[in-house]
Amino acid sequence: MDVLSDVIGAVRTGRPFANREDRRGGWRTDFAAFAGIGFHLVLEGSCRMVTPGAAPLVLQAGDVVLTPRGTAHALTDTGLDDATQLLCGAYQLDRSRLHPLLTDLPEVIHLRARAGGHPTVSAVVGLLGGELTAPGLGADAAIPSLLDLLLLFLLREWLTEEPGRDAAGWCAALTDPAIGTALRCLHDDPLRPWTVEELGARAGLSRAAFSRKFTALVGQPPMAYLTYWRLTLGARLLRETDLPLPSVAQRCGYSSPFAFAAAFKREHGDSPGRYRSRHQADDDIQNWVG
């Protein structure tokens, strides 16, 4: 799961946001599409999730839904005059280019409540709910950290249960012993001058077999993904630090800022300087969550 942590950390921007929503009687809340990941957890009662082009989902207490690409949707009552309590949140993502792991995920992920299930999720939800209801000292630091944990635990739960185990593409790559090993190598040490032969040996496959399987699951050849990941890390450094361009280039495995700038523009469509100057914190999250 280290690769999953890396991916989320590299593409998420700004601060995550969450609040508790209490509803009763006839109600409907619309959530506009946005560039990020949204989630809803039903703490009490029930509701329906309505997404364009899909059958409505009935959500019961303990159910969680994720919208990995911020799909527009609505939550409504189920026609019963009972109280519904929700925990709703969102994570902003870098709009320039999503990681393929996120584009491979379904539009909506529904984790159903089950007896004794999701203990780590339940633990984080309990802590998060307490901080949102009665913020204590350090709540401004605690809440974003708990939201990060919640997102990782929710994705981990899905990847290790149906339909995650039978998923294709990146979801399958993470759980495949050979390709998962190679991805961990690349993410653990992205500056290393990796070769396809060396990665194949780490994965326990011949060069040709490894290259075919990696490309089929990840969607691009091993060296192309390594370049993509290095430049994704570069984008994060440009967004989150004031490091000069030569330092950013060096931390991404490039010997000169000129080589880095050329590669970055090919990947992101902008020069590093323009990318940095244009990147601004976005307030869409708080507008999205009611």
Image: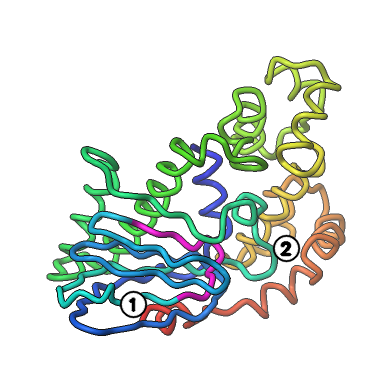
Q: Residues within 10 Å of mark 2 (few under 14, many from 20)?
A: some
Q: Amino acid at mark 2?
A: Leu
Relative to the observer, which residue lies in front, 195 or 167?
Answer: 167
Q: Position of residue 17 (x, y in %)?
A: 37, 71
Q: Position of residue 252 (x, y in %)?
A: 71, 49
Residue range of the region highlighted in magenta in the rendering: 64-73
In screen coordinates, is 200 left or right of 4? right
Q: Position of residue 103 (x, y in %)?
A: 64, 56
Q: Amino acid at mark 1?
A: Thr
Above or below: residue 107 compared with residue 279 = above
Name the front one of labels 1 and 2. Answer: 1
Of the numbered discs 1 and 2, the one sitting upstream in the chain is: 1
Residue 267's quadrant in the figure?
Answer: bottom right
Which disc is residue 245 wearing?
2
Q: In percent of the image, x 60 and y 23: which residue is there?
A: 177
Above or below: residue 272 compared with residue 25 = above
In screen coordinates, is 121 left or right of 67? left
Relative to the observer, which residue lies in front, 97 or 122?
Answer: 122
Above or below: residue 230 compared with residue 142 = above
Which disc is residue 76 wearing?
1
